[in-house]
Amino acid sequence: MNNPWHCLRPITVLPACLKACNWGLPLSKSVIVLGLESSCDDTAAAVVRRDPTGQTEILSSIVRTQTSLHADFGGVVPEIAARAHAEILDHCVEEALTQAKTPLSLIDGIAVTSGPGLIGGVVSGVMCAKGLSAALGIPLYGVNHLAGHALTPRLTDDIPYPYLMLLVSGGHCQFLIAHGPDAFERLGGTIDDAPGEAFDKVARLVGLPQPGGPSVESAAQAGRDGTFTLPRPLLDRAGCDMSFSGLKTAVLRTRDRIVAEHGGLPSQLRADLCAEFQAAVVDVLAEKTRRALSVYLQAAPARATLCVAGGVAANTAIRSALENVSAEFDASFVAPPLSLCTDNAAMIAFAAIEQMPHRRADDLTLTARPRWPLDKTSPAMLGSGKKGAKA
């Protein structure tokens, strides 16, 4: 009887809450939500509880990485990722429930990343969540993966709205003013490669293993200042938009020149190149953050706060630079623990809890979305396609 799956109740009639949208769960009592995340190459499940006073606790957080599955390919292979999610997600759910000492019968709602992300992985999570929701007869909440990151500072530090968020992850980089659980104003972002993509691609260019972020950061520690000079794209252009594709190309050309001159890529010169690339990314993010803070402060918030979240926020050089910029503006700086910067399901469960008083629960028509911009009013930065705005 220790198996949490024994708590599943047989379905005789599809619950009304799954046939038509409702306003979800009341927060006048303790609410326990099971979260699922499978948007890229991390499979995750978590159990999060909020009590009637508003105190939130992560009861469990399970993350299973697929790094070894994609190592030979130099990046994430969508088909491999989707299959791996489908194979392991139920095990992650069971482990999360066991760690939380919470049977399925005590779960009040299911939250799942329903976009944006690699569509095969997102579908795996959505279908698992639908099955659990239907079997248990409890509300289902599709959550924007980016909202999960953007709301993480509320989970870790309970900071008040509005706050400025730099969401900097593998596939996205945006400056957002978070006005509420589902109200985000975009000030700018990347118009091509996100920083995380640039780190991964530069790692491949110089022969470092994936994931590229930690590899490049580690190599950069042995780098010498001033050996190379790389561009700082878009610093001569007003606004908060960023571009890292040209910086990546500059690294490629510098690498080719080194190889031509030395017959290969010496380890010291590799470290020097990584150090200059990282310094360029830091400089761009720092300057654009200054501009974003200037815009944000025009709203005269009672307590100015700069937050950073997403996988690239784990980079210590970037964190340090952003903390210094915050100090320049006398703003508080909030960076979640590294375990909550990378993809996880606790942030998805928490985002659902935050949004419950302001939205309807989803029904079984919930679909996976490869694209899903947080700011619903600003024009798409990367254009649009048949599936809608890309970012």
Image (cartoon, rainbow, N blue to C red):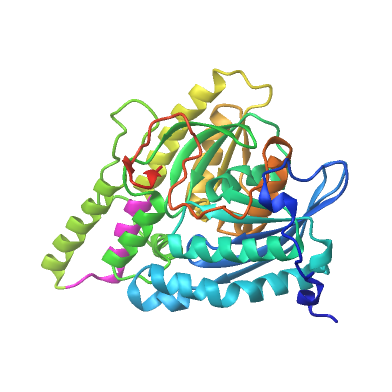
Q: Quadrant of residue 46?
A: bottom right
Start and end of the magenta stretch?
264-278
Q: Is residue 378 visible?
A: yes
Main SS, magenta region, reads: helix
Question: On the picture, is 5 further left or further right than 218?
Answer: right
Please provide percent x and percent y for residue 100.
Answer: 79, 67
Above or below, 101 relative to 199: below
**Viewer-nearest residue: 66 or 115:** 115
* x then y, percent, for residue 229: 25, 47
Closer to the camera in the image, 274 or 354: 354
Decide if residue 338 is on the left or right side of residue 294: right
* Depth order, front residue of 3/268: 3
Residue at the extreme bottom of the image, as rendered: 1
Residue lying at 43% horizontally and 29% vertically, measured from the top left: 378
Image coords of residue 362 (percent x, y):
64, 48
**Given the current orientation, which residue lies at the most extreme left position?**
260
Q: Quadrant of the N terminus?
A: bottom right
- Give percent across and percent down for residue 309: 56, 47
Left or right: where 86 falls relative to 22: left
Which residue is at 34% across, 71% downward? Answer: 74
Which quadrant holds residue 132? bottom right
- The C terminus sits in image quarter: top left
Residue 76 visible somewhere in the drawing: no
